Image: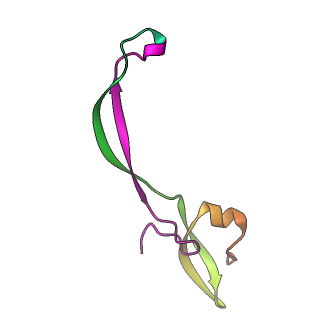
């Protein structure tokens, strides 16, 4: 279970990058043209944390949003 948050289940999301060429019409050009579309992945910001889970210390991957919200009890 790599790249998945242990608490909220946040995982990588697919998306695209769009390459454009040309000057925008409102800037005095003839308009932008799309010259290429490539796939990309948005990865969650995961951290390995030693946490107390059901009374035992365990190393888990947790997203920073869950860490800041205090959804996990960190082990000393």
- As displayed, is residue 53 above or below residue 36? below
Q: Residue at x 35, y 18 (%)?
A: 22
In the orientation shown, which residue stands out farthest toward the bottom?
55
Q: Where is residue 6 shown, x and y percent of the image?
A: 54, 75
The image quarter in which residue 32 lies: top left
How many marks the image carries: the answer is 0
- As displayed, is residue 49 above or below residue 19? below
- As displayed, is residue 15 above or below residue 44? above
The image quarter in which residue 62 lies: bottom right
Q: Where is residue 15 shown, x and y percent of the image?
A: 39, 50
In the orientation shown, which residue stands out farthest toward the right?
70
Q: Is residue 10 magenta?
A: yes
Q: Is residue 15 magenta?
A: yes
* Closer to us: 74 or 13: 13
Instruction: Classify the position of the C terminus by image quarter.
Output: bottom right
Q: Where is residue 1 shown, x and y percent of the image?
A: 42, 75
**What residue span does the magenta drawing correspond to?**
1-26
* Closer to us: 3 or 22: 22
* Closer to us: 73 or 10: 10
Q: Residue at x 63, y 78 (%)?
A: 51
């Amino acid at each position: 279970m790599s790249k998945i948050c242990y608490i909220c289940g946040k995982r990588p999301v697919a998306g695209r990058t769009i390459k454009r060429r040309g000057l925008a019409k409102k800037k005095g050009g003839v308009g932008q043209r799309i010259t290429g579309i490539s796939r990309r992945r948005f990865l969650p910001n995961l951290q390995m944390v030693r946490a107390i889970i059901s009374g035992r210390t365990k190393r888990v991957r947790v997203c920073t949003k869950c860490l800041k919200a205090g959804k996990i009890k960190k082990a000393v």
